[in-house]
Amino acid sequence: MHANPVPLQNFAAFCTILITGVQSLNRWLCHTAICVLQFQGAVCIFILACGWVWAGYMRSREVQRLQALNLQHISSRLAASHGVSSQKAPCPAPPAAAADNSKACLPGVTVVLPIQGYRSHSLLNWQSQLSMQYAGPVEYIFVTQSAADPAIAVLQKMISCEHEAARTQVLISGASSSCSQKIHSLQRGILEASWDSKYVLCLDDDIQLHPGFLQMSVDKMEQDPAAFMLTGYPFDIPDPGAGVLSYAALVYHLPLLIAFSVSQNTSFVWGGCMLFPAAHMVNDTYGIMQAWSDGGYSDDLIVAAKCAEHCLKILCPSGASFPQRLEAHYSWRQYWNYLRRQLYVMDTYATTSNKRINHSLMLIHSYLSWAVILPATTAFLRLILWLAELILLPSQKIWDGPGTSWDWLRIFGAQGCHAGMVSSILFWLGTASAVLALCWMTGVMLALFKELSPGDSSPPQHDCFSWFKLWLGFYLTNAVLPCCMLYTYLNPWVEWGGIWYAKSKGKVRRLHRRVYGSQRQTLRG
């Protein structure tokens, strides 16, 4: 008896239909618009890779400088110990009065830290901020909205344990009515700064500082009288086992890091680290405090706009880089709100020129996001089709008889579609270069943190990053960013720290506040 050929014929027909569909999709991917899109995506991702390489190169120079200084310090200590051992008696220590005079000669600094709530890494961050090594007088002002803030009890206990009460105070700023709560807290802290402080350092409470950061920053400002301010930028560190949405929040800062790495001077400002001359801020020489009060939402964009308006110089040394540890788990609501808050600032502005710049950045950011994601989608689809055709073609050879041709150009959809083939290969080469560039830059940043904080008992490690989750988060963030941008532009409301802000004509005009407990309060500016 012969086997029934009908099932075999049906399977052959099914395979033929599948491979015809795969080839049709391949021909669709050979459309000129798709090829142009993939060429454009390859260019964009190559540029991104070059930016990360440059950012890593600038930080690697700082790592080499710090290593050379450490070697010099070790050599000088060895020489000093050799000199002391060859003498009969050691030299007497300098008198305490001389040390006090040296400290008095250095400019005083007031550190202002707005705080709200207590998170998993808050204690570590506050300890690093209070442990900065500075040879001059320094005071810390922690500013919170309400005495009911749960951070106050933890902070006061830490201050008493660290014996920092003499130079640390906790200030209750009250609720803001015409600007963001952070700006309101910054203003209160700046105005409460000691009269003999030459500089005021405004910090976010969610970054971990290096011991020598304050000394380095003041030295940079003192060495350059033309500089108005100094800023830095964070590098996000995920917790072990962090989810995809945590990585999606992490990758938002990665392209922006390039802008703070071009040179030691910049036109950008990050609100988490701003060192100002205290007199210029208290006297409001350049109108920053007034712009903050007048419906200000984004402290750093307003400062950058005023610096551009008055041609003020902004320093951004490579050593002003900080680890910012992210929470391990983000819900979709937390991630969406985080992304909205980052994009909300682009529709706030202090001047007409500031409005044009911010809205241009909105369009450029949205365009570049999809300029990378759309070709990534088509290139990934083409890769899937190649694999499908490789799987299906042998079945065609078996069931179609000896006349079936092994046409490899046809398998990869390259027959008559050389542009599509080349554009896909270029895009994947660009993606590979971006992966390698980001891995290398990450290693350099972690090496820099190790040099800046040699006594850190738990420095961030390279293996705490999940690169699969990171690139999945990169795809997710850039895929939803233009949609989130449009929604944020059309929706005037956003929530930040339990407060709902409404913008109108680039300024915060209405606040809906949730006070600790169940009380609610609505304020209009």
Image (cartoon, grey):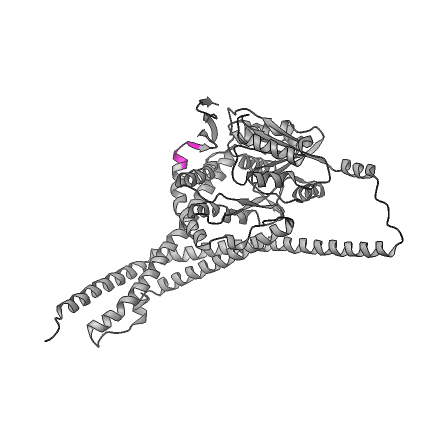
The spot of residue 23 in percent (x, y) is 27, 63
Q: Residue at x 70, y 56 (%)?
A: 68
Q: Residue at x 15, y 67 (%)?
A: 7
Query: What span is colored magenta in the figure?
Result: 488-494
Q: Is residue 492 above or below residue 243?
A: above
Q: Is residue 56 above or below residue 17?
A: above
Q: Nearer the viewer, residue 186 or 208?
A: 208
The quarter of the displayed image where residue 173 is located:
top right
Residue situated furthest left in the rendering: 1
**The N terminus - image quarter:** bottom left
Residue situated furthest bottom in the rendering: 402
Q: Is residue 30 visible?
A: no
Q: Is residue 344 left or right of residue 63?
A: left
Q: Is residue 11 visible?
A: yes
**Number of numbered discs:** 0
The spot of residue 4 in percent (x, y) is 12, 71
Q: Residue at x 44, y 58 (%)?
A: 431
Q: Is residue 379 left or right of residue 148?
A: left
Q: Is residue 79 left or right of residue 298?
A: right
The spot of residue 323 in percent (x, y) is 56, 46
Magenta stretch containing residue 491, yes or no? yes
Q: Is residue 309 above or below residue 65?
A: above
Magenta stretch containing residue 320, yes or no? no
Q: Is residue 510 above or below residue 446?
A: above
The spot of residue 368 in percent (x, y) is 43, 49
Q: Residue at x 42, y 59 (%)?
A: 427
